[in-house]
Amino acid sequence: MDDVLNLARVKAELSYLNRLDEIREINVASLKRLKEARDALLGRGSEVAEISTSRRL
């Protein structure tokens, strides 16, 4: 019976870790899109770039 319980726990943990990995992949993709959007905005005009760089300082 202990083996069955341990197997159930391992399966549950693997399922949880798989879900975390899926969320990480979604977050990485979102971050990439945000960076591309930021870069596109910064490339549109020097005024936007100046505002953005002044905030970093």
Image (tube, rainbow, N blue to C red):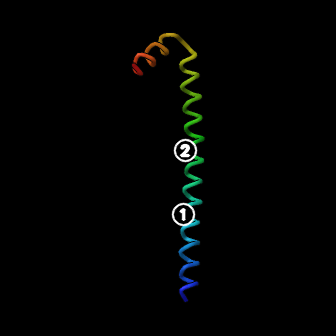
* Alpha carbon separation for disc pair 2 and 1: 16 Å
Pointers 2 and 1 in contact (C-beta within 8 Å): no
Q: Position of residue 43 (x, y in %)?
A: 58, 16
Q: Position of residue 31 (x, y in %)?
A: 55, 37
Residue type at mark 1 is Tyr
Image quadrant occupied by the C terminus: top left
Q: Residues within 10 Å of mark 1 (few under 14, many from 20)?
A: few
Query: Mark 2 or mark 1: which comes first in sequence?
Result: 1
Marks counted in the figure total 2
Badge 1 marks a residue whose secondary structure is helix
Which quadrant holds residue 53? Answer: top left
Q: Position of residue 17 (x, y in %)?
A: 56, 61
* Residue at x-position 57% and y-position 72%: 10
Q: Residues within 10 Å of mark 2 (few under 14, many from 20)?
A: few
Which quadrant holds residue 4? Answer: bottom right
Image quadrant occupied by the N terminus: bottom right
Horizontally, residue 51 falls left or right of residue 15, namely left
Horizontally, residue 25 falls left or right of residue 48, namely right
Q: Position of residue 50 (x, y in %)?
A: 46, 13
Residue type at mark 2 is Asn
In the rendered image, which residue does mark 1 sit on? 16
Q: Residue furthest top?
A: 46
Badge 2 marks a residue whose secondary structure is helix
* Residue at x-position 60% and y-position 47%: 25
Q: Which mark, by number, is residue 49? A: none
* Residue at x-position 58% and y-position 78%: 7
In the rendered image, which residue does mark 2 sit on? 27
Up the image or down, 45 lies above or below 19; here it is above
Q: Nearer the viewer, residue 25 or 41?
A: 25
* Residue at x-position 54% and y-position 63%: 16
Q: Residue furthest bottom?
A: 1
